[in-house]
């Protein structure tokens, strides 16, 4: 009888050890699952951030205007800008391409201290004088076909920008030439990047190249 009791007690001890090992094993599985979930969530968040940064960079680099050349159009009023979209850019409406021109006014507009004139507009409209600034695509021979309603990558275009509002903001070719000053031109694409160039007029006659 005594031997039987000792044998039963020994078997009970082994069962308790097995249950403890099972509990530890399950705990390890749970900890590993939680750790795996955290790692997966972190990796997914990093991937999303990287994707977002890459998309933003692509938009800034590809969704922008490349200025090919600038000419004097109306010496007292406007320039003609030849441009195209950067490679990889999406088709863009002319109204989503904005321009700004800043130039120094030595007389401050009233014989006072120098100031800065600012003119701006869109590639399908002038600065509120009722006219339009039409975007025209150029063919291989430089001819001017129909007016563009969409600006596409890989095609060159021309557009006239009116830089004299006939009131107090005058960055016209003649004004820059007479004052021997330069103008800063910015072209922005909505949802894309921006382009900067310096306009220096050495000759204000119609068709003259602007440096």
Image (tube, grey):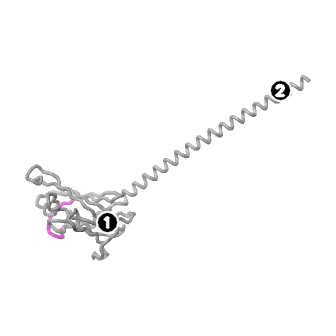
Nearer to the camera, 204 or 12: 12
Please name the residue that numbered disc 2 is placed on.
9
Quadrant hosting residue 166: bottom left
Q: Residues within 10 Å of mark 2 (few under 14, many from 20)?
A: few
Rounded to the nearest angstrom, the CA distance separating label 1 from label 2 is 90 Å
Instruction: Give the x, y percent position of residue 76.
Output: 14, 65
Q: Is residue 132 magenta?
A: no
Marked residue nearer the N-terminal end (1 or 2):
2
Identify the residue at image location x=27%, y=75%.
144
Nearer to the camera, 110 or 80: 110
| Numbered label attached to residue 61 | none
| Numbered label attached to residue 94 | 1
Q: Is label 2 in a helix, a strand or a loop?
A: helix
Nearer to the camera, 109 or 172: 109
Range of residues picked out in magenta? 199-208
Vertical comparison of 149 with 165: above or below: below
Instruction: Give the x, y percent position of residue 7.
Output: 86, 27
Observer-side mark, 1 or 2, equals: 1
Q: Is label 1 in a helix, a strand or a loop?
A: helix
Identify the residue at image location x=39%, y=54%.
57
Instruction: Give the x, y percent position of residue 135.
Output: 28, 69
Identify the residue at image location x=62%, y=38%.
31
């Amino acid at each position: 009888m005594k031997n039987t009791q000792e044998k039963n007690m020994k078997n009970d001890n082994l069962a308790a050890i097995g249950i403890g090992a099972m509990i530890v094993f399950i705990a390890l599985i749970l900890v590993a699952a939680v750790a795996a979930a955290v790692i997966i969530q972190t990796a997914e968040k990093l991937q999303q951030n990287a994707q977002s940064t890459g998309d933003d960079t692509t938009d800034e680099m590809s969704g922008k205007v490349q200025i090919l050349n600038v000419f004097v159009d109306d010496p007292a009023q406007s320039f003609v800008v030849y441009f195209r979209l950067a490679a990889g850019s999406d088709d863009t409406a002319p109204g989503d391409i904005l321009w700004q021109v800043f130039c120094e006014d030595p007389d401050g507009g009233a014989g006072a201290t120098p100031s800065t004139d600012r003119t701006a507009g869109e590639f399908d409209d002038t600065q509120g004088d009722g006219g339009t600034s039409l975007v025209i695509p150029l063919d291989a021979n430089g001819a001017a076909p129909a007016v563009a309603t969409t600006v596409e990558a890989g095609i060159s275009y021309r557009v006239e920008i009116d830089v004299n509002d006939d009131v107090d903001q005058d960055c016209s070719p003649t004004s820059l030439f007479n004052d021997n000053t330069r103008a800063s031109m910015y072209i922005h694409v909505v949802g894309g990047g921006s382009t900067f160039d310096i306009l220096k007029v050495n000759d204000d006659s119609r068709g003259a190249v602007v440096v």
